[in-house]
Structures are given as structure tokens and as C-alpha cells.
Image: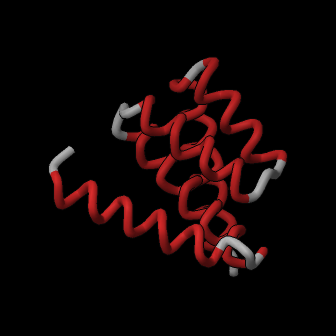
Amino acid sequence: MNRSSEIVEFSAIAVQEKWLGSKAVREQLSSVHSGWTNWYLQTGQYGKAREAVWRAAQLDPRSNIAVKWLLTWISPQLALRTVQRYQERSKESSRFM
């Protein structure tokens, strides 16, 4: 990691910590981290996927995040397939709306 990315990451964490008092903000940040988890799984970056889903669980512990966390540790490939199936179902259901 280079110096500029460390500064950006530190700044992002500082902003997160400031706004974490709001439940709505925590839920949104959890969703962002969950999305990053999906992307990391799709790109084969399993270590980063585990970090992202852990952060999502810390921000807003929900059963679906807990299952995703467990799957990223037990079988990242199964976690990826599960995410892909969920995304496909979401696309198919939005076609009817």
C-alpha cells in the first residue's frame, strides 16, 4: 500500500468513526462493505472479502451478513456462488416491476 492510499484509507476511517453514532449511517456503511465483499469474492480476493464482511458485521450485525461472513471463511467459492444466485434472482424479479 502506498502512502497516498494509506492517507485516504485513514481519512475514510476517521469519517466513518465520526458518523457511526447514527444507526442509519451504520446500516448504509454495512451495505457498502457487504457490496465490497461481493466484489472481492468475484475478483478472487478472499482475504479482502473476509475483512470487508467482518467490517459490515461490526457496523450492522444481521443474519444475512453473519451467513456471508461464515461462508467467506468456510468456502469463499460457495459464498461467491451464493452471491451470484442472489444477484440473478434480484435481476429477474426487477424485470416484472
* Count of numbered badges drawn on the protein: 0
**Residue occupying the point 60% across, 49% down:** 55
Q: Residue furthest top?
A: 74
Q: How was the colour assigned to the protein in this rendering? A: secondary structure
Above-or-below relation of 31 to 2 = below
**Residue occupying the point 62% across, 78% down:** 19
Q: Position of residue 30 (x, y in %)?
A: 64, 60
User: Quick check: 40 left or right of 59?
Assistant: left
Query: Between 53 and 85, which is closer to the camera in this rendering?
Result: 53
State the quadrant of the C terminus. Answer: bottom right
Quadrant in the rendering for residue 45: top left
Q: Position of residue 14 (x, y in %)?
A: 48, 68
Q: Residue furthest right?
A: 63
**Residue occupying the point 53% across, 26% down:** 76
Q: Position of residue 68 (x, y in %)?
A: 67, 38
Query: Between 33 and 82, which is closer to the camera in this rendering?
Result: 33
User: Quick check: 11 left or right of 80?
Assistant: left
State the quadrant of the N terminus. Answer: top left
Query: Between 8 and 53, which is closer to the camera in this rendering?
Result: 8
